[in-house]
Image (spheres, helix red, strand yellow):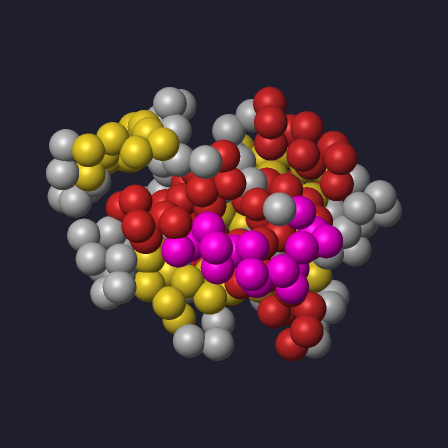
């Protein structure tokens, strides 16, 4: 029997929701479902889910936007499950923060295998206090302490650092970071992100010119190395 998990299915097709609910319930999962993006976001705010199966084509807002909104405040695992199969759609979903991408029609055994694989991975969360060997961050006070020196984090610095810590050891594109923090209209404003990264490195890195934690991924973006 599969390990127990709480799964939200977001799809505008009633038959897909019924099939997935029956399949997942039979495997021992607790299952919720939503037809619209706003319903899904309300459920995510009200309940704790371990994994979300999310369609791109929703009747109110795009599943990409739903994924991006979830990523601004929650570390739940997200698998996009959609009829869209283009590389452009897949890239957009991954940039928005999806952990995986499957196209319809899908093989049920493969979907269940992917769900089990994602649920085996530890959930990465960031509490109000983050401690590592070189610095300590108090997110509620927006204070970083390094070598017994306290430095204030500006609001955007705090948001970027929290988002990177929640996705640590994962390469994040410029677009994903910008849209997660500044919003969907800022995907190309790299100068904003670059300025924040420079300031963060000055505040947390032992040697900002040779970053140990916030590393640059050439032509892609950044990664927080743990």
Quarter of the image containing the N terminus? top left
User: Could you say which is closer to the camera, residue 104 or residue 137?
Assistant: 137
Q: Is residue 63 above or below residue 106?
A: above
Residue at position x 68%, y 28% in the image: 42
Q: Magenta span: helix, strand or loop, mainly? A: helix
Residue 115 in percent (x, y) is at 47, 53
Residue 199 in percent (x, y) is at 39, 49
User: Could you say which is closer to the camera, residue 21 or residue 138?
Assistant: 138
Q: Residue furthest right?
A: 59
Whether residue 191 appears in magenta in the rendering, the answer is: yes
**Residue range of the region highlighted in magenta in the rendering:** 183-198
Q: Is residue 21 above or below residue 42?
A: below
Residue 144 visible somewhere in the drawing: yes
Residue 140 in percent (x, y) is at 40, 23
Residue at position x 85%, y 46% in the image: 59
Residue at position x 73%, y 68% in the image: 84
Q: Is residue 219 above or below residue 209?
A: below
Whether residue 216 appears in magenta in the rendering, the answer is: no
């Amino acid at each position: 029997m599969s390990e127990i998990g709480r799964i939200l299915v977001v799809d505008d097709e009633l038959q897909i929701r019924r099939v997935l609910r029956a399949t997942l319930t039979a495997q021992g999962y607790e299952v919720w479902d939503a037809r619209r993006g706003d319903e899904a976001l309300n459920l995510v705010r009200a309940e704790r889910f371990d994994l979300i199966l999310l369609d791109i084509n929703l009747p109110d807002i795009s599943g990409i936007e739903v994924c991006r909104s979830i990523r601004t405040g929650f570390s739940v695992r997200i698998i996009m499950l959609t009829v869209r199969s283009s590389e452009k759609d897949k890239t957009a979903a991954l940039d928005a923060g999806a952990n995986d991408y499957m196209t319809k029609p899908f093989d049920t055994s493969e979907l269940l295998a992917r769900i089990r694989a994602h649920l085996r991975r530890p959930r990465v969360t960031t509490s109000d206090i983050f401690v590592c060997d070189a610095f300590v961050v108090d997110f509620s006070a927006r204070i970083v302490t390094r070598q017994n020196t306290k430095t204030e984090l500006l609001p955007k610095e705090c948001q970027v650092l929290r988002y990177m810590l929640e996705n640590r050891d994962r390469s994040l594109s410029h677009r994903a970071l910008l849209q997660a923090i500044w919003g969907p209209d800022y995907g190309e404003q790299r100068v904003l992100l670059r300025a924040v990264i420079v300031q963060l490195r000055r505040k947390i890195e032992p040697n900002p010119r040779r970053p140990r934690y916030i590393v640059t991924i050439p032509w892609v973006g950044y990664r927080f190395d743990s």
